Image (spheres, rainbow, N blue to C red):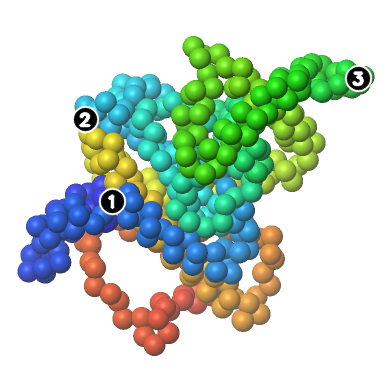
Amino acid sequence: MTASALNIGYAPVIKAGTAALERDRLSHVAQNYLSAETFSLANAPLIEEQAKIGFAQQLGGGLVAAIDGMRFVVPVPSIYTRPNRKFFGGKRGLTWLNMINDQGVGLGAKVVTGTVRDSLHMIDVLFRRDGGQRPDNIVTDTGSYSDVVFGLVHLLGMQYRPALVDLPDQKGWRIQDADHGPLARFARGKIDLAKVKRHWDDILRVVASIYTGRIRAYDVIRMLQRDGNPTPLGDAIAVYGRIFKTLHILTYAVEEPYRRDIKGIRNLQESRHALAGKIFHGRKGEVYQRYYKGMEDQLGALGLVLNCVTMWNTFYVDKALGRLREAGYLLAEEDVARLSPFGRRHINVIGTYTFTLPDLGPAGVQELRDPDEPDWVD
C-alpha cells in the first residue's frame, strides 16, 4: 500500500531478511490481495470509526458530500487517457473523481479517463460509495452539473447544490405566466409540465434502475442524449430538473449561509487533494499504469491511505481538544468547526520507511505536546 499510494515502487520499502518485506512476497500480496475492491472493503470500517470521533461530529453530520476530480498526468501510452492542455500540458492524463463527506472522510471514488464532464459519472460515484450514510446534499463544482443531473439527483431523493459562477447571467424557469417584478428577466424560461407528465412512468423506471444498481447512471445519461441533443425522455427529466435548479439559484443568491456551506465543503475537498498530492509524491506525482485496472488499484490505495491519515489526524485533534478543555482553555465551537482533518506538516513521506509498531504504552496513544510550548520552526 505504501509503495502504491506514495507512488515510489517496491525498492524503498523492501527490507532484506524480513520475510514480509521481500520483493517476491510484496509482489505476491499485491497481485492477489490488494485491489480497488479490497480497498473499498477496508474503507468501510474507517468511515464508520471516523464518524464516532467527537471532532468529526463537530465538523458535520456526515449527510453533506462533495464530489470533485483530481487530475493526474499519465506519461506512458494508454487508451484510457485523454489530452487536455489545461490540466496535463502537452501530455495525456486521467481524472480521479472522488467523494468526501463533511466529516472529511473519503466515501468513494472512480477513475475517469481523460477530462470528460464529471456529471456523466457523478451519480455513479454517489451510489458506489464504500460506506457511511448516504448523503442528503451533494455539492460539486460549476462544470459538473446539467439540467438532467439536477432532475436525476432530486428524483433519487437528494438535494443537489453545485457551485455557481456568473450568477447575474443565470437563467431561471417559471411554471406559470405571472408578473415576477425584478425577477422577470431571470425567470425568462417556461417549464412545460406536460412533458414531465407524458414521460412520468418511464422516468420512474429509469430512476428505479439507477437506485437498485441495475444500470449505471453514466450509461443512462448517455442514452438520454442523441448527437448532443436530449431525447424526449431526457428532455422531460431536464424539464423536471429545472424546477430545482431555479430554486437552487434563488437560494444561492439570497442566503449567505447556504453559499458558505457550499464553499466550506469544497474548500475541505481541496485540502484533501493537497494532502493527496503530498502523499502521491513519487515520480513527480504522475501515474505510470497503462491499464484501467492498474490505475484503479493504485488510486484505490491512495484513497485508503488518505482515509488512514485523515482518521489519525481526526483522532489526535480530538484528543488535543479534550486536553485543552480539561486545562480550562475556552474553545469556541465555531472555531473548532473550522479546523482541518487534513493537516500535513507532520506527515513525512520522504526518507526511510519502517513498519515496526511503536510502543504507545498502556494508553495506546502517543503523548500530546504541551500546548504552552512554542510551535516547531520549519
Q: Nearer the viewer, residue 91 or 134?
A: 134
**Does residue 195 appear anywhere in the picture?**
yes
Crowd tier of the residue under label 3, counting other residues whose Cα lies within 10 Å: few below 14, some 14–19, many 20 or above = few
302 sits left or right of 368 in the view: left
Compared to 142, does 126 lie above or below?
below
Q: Which residue is mark 3?
A: 178
Q: Nearer the viewer, residue 304 or 155?
A: 155
Q: Say whether disc 1 or disc 3 marks the residue closer to the N-terminus.
A: 1
Placement of the N terminus among the 4 image quadrants? bottom left
Placement of the C terminus among the 4 image quadrants? bottom left
Residue 178 image position (x, y, % from top left)? 91, 19
Residue ID at (56%, 78%): 323
Q: Say whether disc 1 or disc 2 marks the residue closer to the N-terminus.
A: 1
248 sits left or right of 103 in the view: right
Residue ID at (32%, 42%): 296
Q: Which residue is mark 2?
A: 76
Q: Quadrant of residue 34?
A: bottom left
Mark drawn on residue 35: 1
Compared to 54, does 285 lie above or below?
above
